[in-house]
Image: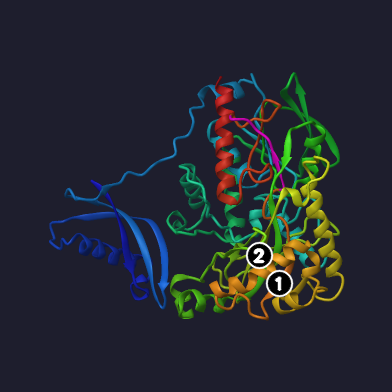
Amino acid sequence: MRYQISEIRLTPEEYGDRERRMSILEGKIRRKLGKQDSSLEISDIRILKESIDARKKPQVYAVYTLAFACNRELPLRSWEEEAYIPPQAEEAARKVRDGEVPRPVIAGFGPCGLFAALILAEAGCRPIVLERGKPVNERMADVERFWQGGEPDPESNVQFGEGGAGTFSDGKLTTGIRDIRIRRVLQEFVRAGAGEEILYRHRPHIGTDRLRQIIPRIRERIISLGGEIRFQTKLAGLIAEEGRLTGLRTVSGGREEILPARWLILAVGHSARDTFRMLREEGIPMESKPFSIGVRVEYHQNKIDRAQYGDPDLARVFGPAEYRLHWRGESGRGVYTFCMCPGGQVINASSGREQAVTNGMSNQARDGEYANSGLLVDVRVEDYARDDDPLAGVAFQQKYEKLAWEQARGAGKERGLPISTWGRFRENSEDPVRSSLPPFAAEGIREAMPHLGRKLQGFDDEDTRMTAVETRSSSPVRILRDEEGQSAIRGLLPAGEGPGYAGGIMSAAVEGIRAAERVIEGLNR
């Protein structure tokens, strides 16, 4: 039988390489069971969860939940692996193959579109993906040119292109949702080259360098299964008859094409502002939603390792330390850290001219000298709503992105972004970073920083660097859908971050799988 056992602890000295670690874990299982006799056979040990317990620093432990097989009946919880069961799609595949219905289409090739395409391709439904940006390698070259001082390419940048915005990130795979599809996503990443540790780490990540290798491998798998990726092709309009989607207008190389379509998974990212405007003009129901605005804070990683582990040398064993901080101010607004990048770098994530947008990214090794994270303040709909315009939040973002760009043209420019320190931000109302924020956000950060510094020693040091402005943590709009995941136009399925239903790589990927399942269900009817 197979069993599950929890609270197995390893010291830093026991952690070692994986082979040694697994041998020690077997001994720990035996000791916890109180059974040392050699006739007890323990085999096929599998790590289900690994986390770090630093509550009694500098005594820090790796804590495990394990599954294992045993030749005896034990007073433990039995364990069976849950597996994602792909939808039955024989009829759907036949209809597409025989030309009874057009091939399903996906707009956007970030995590949502990537996994929607993969599930549809595996089902034999030969999806077509429309991606306005370029493949990873070409996109990387465009971004590097921009970072070296060139103009941003509005169709190929940190936001647009193969892999979506997550391609230039830490590759975090944490999520607050619980869904069997999460395991399916992780397994596919491992199949494409990610380390197996993402299957059990408490806060798994891939790293931007590994993501850039992994995503093209998944793309090639989609193509091998009959899918098609049309890069540098933008969704320009919808065609519907009697409330049902019948076709799409696309633009590629300046040429417009009509593409027959009865099913479209709308997996555009949170920066597809022109697409949002097109959909509003097409009469697609949408509404404003809350989002956040703030800055990137940056400091020595060693400082965080010391604060979190008690001994910074433990970072060599357990990896660079992470944190999540939150404070609710007197106004009731939340101020919180977001997308913490250990050993990473702050980047210019702008997707167009006359805008300054910041974000953070890190490689798989997370071995840089500095750490960074977003420090964001809640933006409420009432902060920006006007005339019932569902895209007022987009205008709000654009206002402060342009303001940050103007601030970056003066003193304190680096990476094409306004920079400062916490000390200057706190004391000077004309500080370029502080001036790039709405007053409520600047005051929220000024109020929160000392409290956050008490939670994490060193966070509010005078020389903590601040870079403005971070606006793209989530979408400012929600494109409405019903219980079947469809918009008012039947066959249009908004999904993922851009339409307002996800917040990160994992939740967006799960959204893509769900949307693909709904398309298959519709094709099967």
In terms of sequence position, does the residue under pointer 2 or pointer 1 come before the other?
Answer: 2
Q: Amino acid at mark 2?
A: Leu
Q: Which residues are magenta?
A: 476-483
- Give how far across and how far down residue 121 sits, in percent: 57, 35
The kind of secondary structure element at disc 1 is strand
According to the picture, the residue beneath numbered tag 1 turns out to be 466
Question: CB atoms at circles 2 and 1 under 8 Å apart?
Answer: yes
**Which quadrant, please, contains the C terminus?**
top right
- In this rendering, the answer to whether 485 lies above or below 268 is above
| Residue ID at (70%, 27%) | 488
Q: Is residue 347 left or right of residue 40?
A: right
Q: CA distance from mark 2 to mark 1?
A: 9 Å
Q: Amino acid at mark 1?
A: Met
Q: Is residue 485 left or right of residue 60?
A: right
Q: Residues within 10 Å of mark 1 (few under 14, many from 20)?
A: many
- Viewer-proximal residue, 522 or 53? 53
Q: Main secondary structure of the magenta part?
A: loop
- Give how far across and how far down residue 140 sits, in percent: 71, 59
- Viewer-proximal residue, 177 or 151? 177
Q: Residues within 10 Å of mark 2 (few under 14, many from 20)?
A: many
According to the picture, the residue beneath numbered tag 2 turns out to be 375
- In this rendering, the answer to whether 19 lies above or below 457 is above
The kind of secondary structure element at disc 2 is strand
Q: Indicate yes or no whether the magenta region holds residue 424.
A: no
